[in-house]
Image (cartoon, rainbow, N blue to C red):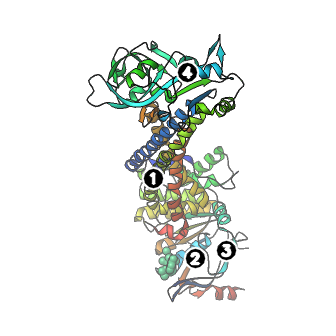
């Protein structure tokens, strides 16, 4: 037991219908605020998950010394792939084939048919070995790219800011002044790869007039860790190679996004702050017109605590309704919406964490909004409250 | 033992360096089952005295003892719980909760007592019946006339069967006909239920139903022309 009796539930509910116009306006305001919170949290969660799922713990990226921060800047000789697969211990092998994928990775202009302006796309030159190492990649439509063809990631259209139709199978893209036919689409369990365009390595090298590659991605043999590869790179200093676990690479990318995330959270706090004022305003309006009534309840014998809880109940009820409406809208409209971002694209994710934060913020708005007016009304002596009009 | 004992009660307000003393060393005993009217000029301190007896205001010095309990020393939360059980308050302007029906308004004090909903229902029905509004249980205050609203207010004041029911100008806001009804009702409650009533009024007709008529003059309680303390001394 609480040690004191609460006001009846109906009292709070019916008070919300006392001034329906005001309640509806507040509901709208709170819904909007919570929706904005959902957008921000969905954004951050989407970004985080995309980077978090991007790293495959068994994959190590071998790149040039100092190229580990941004693989676009890494350059190693093309023969490194063969050399590594021959001499590297600890790489997964099957039937004599080493799981080592030489890749050329770059950001460059890409235009779709009828485009006036090209857009920045992430392009990866690959060989059939890529399918061994990139085990999460799945061709979901069409086929693996042959010469002059490109395999398009699920989120590449979002990254390029084009409609899905522009990248449909059979359409052509212009990359580095050469045209490429879309051979198919791939998914990669939400990882950053999904925003990329994959071409056969040799074709891309020719188009780029490059002989080098950016990196070799290798799969570790079961039970081994990246230390093996690291040691090799340190022994063979002449090759000027360095190794970064793929998970580590994406973790370091996540660090780059820290300011963006901080900004996003800051924005959310500002929006939530504005929401508190909406809640406060309503509750002040609602309480000020009820001073005598609240004094009457005290005269009858309800404690100030019970009345405060009643007022909080009212406000959180309204806020909860707003949060539910916002959550439904968020799940229907925001969840899964693709967002273009500097180095790729990802989808907004309204997951359980986002729901928790969004709805929690909504309820908190109601709670925080109810407290000051409740204190103001109840600090007044009862006999003064009874004289209020 | 009297039901209500007011002992050396003084209430002082200071506004800047000005002091107002609506009550000065007041003494009053109210016996169980009595019907007392309290008259006096506007601003003479009638409400102040009533509110201290009802436990919603505190004296500057002195004591109020109700049913053997000195309520002037209770903590705020204890006092709230005490009011629920021991005092019924009839307001000048009924003060019903607009979002609750007549039934629910009368139920409010009972929610503070350890009663089952069946027990509450029985009591509410009795109270509404006593004020002649059993058929209006589901009506909201706005669907009732001023006199009916006040009767619901009276039902709310008596439903918990409190030791004392106080009224601060309960007929002050009503027309002559409704006033008549309310006065009859209060008399009946006093006679039939034995409810102890203390009614503040400036209307002689309302005061006329009382068995004891008390006046507040210059901070002093006067009964039948003599200060109460003096009368009691004479009686002793
Ligand atoms: N909160 C207050 N502050 C200062 N003076 C007050 C306050 N409440 C009442 N008074 C004064 O106390 C006196 C008695 O008031 P009250 O008991 O309401 O009179 P009434 O007999 O009309 O009911 C009045 O002079 C009033 O102005
Ligand atoms: Mg008064």
- Which of discs 3 and 1 lies nearer the camera? The answer is 1
Q: Position of residue A111 (x, y in %)?
A: 32, 26
Secondary element under disc 2, as helix, strand or loop, is helix
Q: Say which residue label 2 marks.
A: B49
Can you tell which mark lies on residue B35?
none
For the residue labelled by badge 3, is the local secondary structure a helix, a strand or a loop? Answer: helix
First in sequence: mark 3 or mark 2?
2
**CB atoms at circles 3 and 2 under 8 Å apart?**
no
Q: Is residue A307 left or right of residue A116?
A: right
Secondary structure beneath label 1 = helix
**Which residue does the numbered mark 4 point to in the structure image?**
A101
| Observer-nearest of A64 and B18 | A64
Subunit under mark 4:
A
Disc 3: which residue: B72
Q: Nearer the viewer, mark 2 or mark 1?
A: 1
Residue A341, quarter of picture: top left
Q: Nearer the viewer, mark 3 or mark 4?
A: 4
Kindly identify which residue carries mark 1: A270
**Looking at the image, residue B200 lies above or below residue A359:** below
Q: Residue at x 67, y 85 (%)?
A: B232
């Amino acid at each position: 037991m609480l040690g004191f009796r609460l006001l009846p539930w109906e009292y709070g509910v019916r008070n919300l219908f006392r001034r329906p116009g005001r309640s509806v306006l507040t509901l709208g305001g709170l819904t909007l605020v919570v929706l904005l919170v959902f957008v921000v949290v969905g954004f951050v969660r989407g970004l985080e998950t995309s980077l978090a799922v991007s790293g495959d713990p068994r994959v190590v990226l071998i790149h040039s010394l100092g190229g580990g921060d941004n693989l676009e800047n890494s350059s190693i000789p093309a023969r490194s792939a063969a050399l590594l697969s021959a001499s590297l211990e600890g790489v997964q092998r099957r039937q004599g084939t080493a799981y080592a994928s030489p890749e050329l990775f770059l950001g460059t202009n890409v235009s779709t048919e009828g485009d006036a302006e090209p857009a920045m796309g992430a392009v990866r030159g690959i060989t059939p070995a890529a399918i061994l190492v990139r085990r999460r990649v799945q061709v979901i439509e069409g086929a693996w790219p042959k010469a002059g063809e490109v395999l398009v990631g699920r989120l590449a259209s979002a990254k390029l800011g084009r409609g899905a139709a522009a990248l449909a199978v059979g359409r052509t893209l212009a990359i580095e002044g050469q045209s490429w036919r879309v051979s198919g689409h791939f998914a990669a369990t939400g990882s950053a790869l999904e925003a990329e365009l994959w071409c056969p390595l040799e074709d891309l090298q020719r188009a780029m007039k490059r002989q080098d590659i950016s990196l070799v991605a290798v799969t570790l043999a079961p039970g081994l860790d990246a230390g093996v590869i690291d040691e090799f790179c340190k022994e063979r200093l002449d090759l000027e190679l360095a190794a970064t676990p793929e998970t580590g690479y994406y973790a370091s990318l996540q660090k780059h996004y820290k300011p963006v995330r901080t900004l996003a959270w800051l924005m959310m706090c500002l929006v939530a702050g504005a929401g508190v004022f909406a809640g406060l305003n309503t509750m002040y309006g609602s309480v000020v017109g009820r001073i005598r009534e609240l004094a009457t309840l005290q005269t009858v014998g309800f404690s100030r605590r019970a009345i405060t809880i009643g007022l909080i109940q009212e406000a959180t009820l309204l806020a909860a309704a707003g949060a539910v409406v916002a959550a439904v809208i968020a799940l229907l409209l925001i969840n899964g919406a693709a967002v273009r971002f500097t180095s790729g694209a990802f989808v907004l994710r309204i997951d359980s964490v986002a729901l928790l934060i969004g709805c929690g913020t909504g309820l908190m708005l109601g709670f925080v909004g109810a407290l000051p007016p409740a204190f103001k009304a109840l600090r007044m002596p009862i006999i003064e409250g009874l004289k209020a009009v | 033992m009297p039901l209500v004992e007011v002992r050396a009660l003084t209430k002082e307000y200071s506004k800047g360096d000005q002091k107002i003393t609506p009550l000065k060393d007041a003494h009053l005993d109210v016996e169980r089952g009595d019907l007392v009217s309290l008259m006096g000029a506007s601003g003479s301190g009638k409400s102040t005295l009533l509110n201290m007896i009802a436990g919603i205001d505190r004296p500057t010095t002195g004591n109020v003892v109700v049913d053997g309990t000195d309520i002037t020393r209770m903590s705020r939360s204890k006092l709230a719980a005490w009011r629920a059980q021991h005092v019924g308050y009839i307001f000048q302007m009924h003060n019903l909760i607009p979002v609750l029906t007549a039934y629910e308004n009368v139920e409010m004090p009972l929610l503070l007592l350890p009663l089952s909903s069946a027990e509450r229902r029985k009591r509410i029905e009795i109270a509404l019946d006593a004020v002649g509004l059993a058929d209006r249980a589901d009506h909201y205050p706005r669907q009732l006339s001023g006199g009916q609203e006040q009767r619901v207010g009276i039902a709310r004041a008596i439903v918990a069967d409190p030791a004392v029911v106080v009224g601060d100008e309960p007929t002050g806001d009503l027309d002559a006909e409704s006033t008549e009804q309310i006065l009859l009702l209060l008399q009946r409650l006093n006679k039939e239920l034995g409810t102890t009533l203390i009614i503040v009024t400036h209307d002689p007709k309302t005061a006329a139903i009382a068995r004891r008529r008390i006046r507040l003059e210059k901070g002093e309680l006067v009964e039948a022309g003599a200060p109460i303390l003096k009368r009691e001394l004479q009686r002793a």
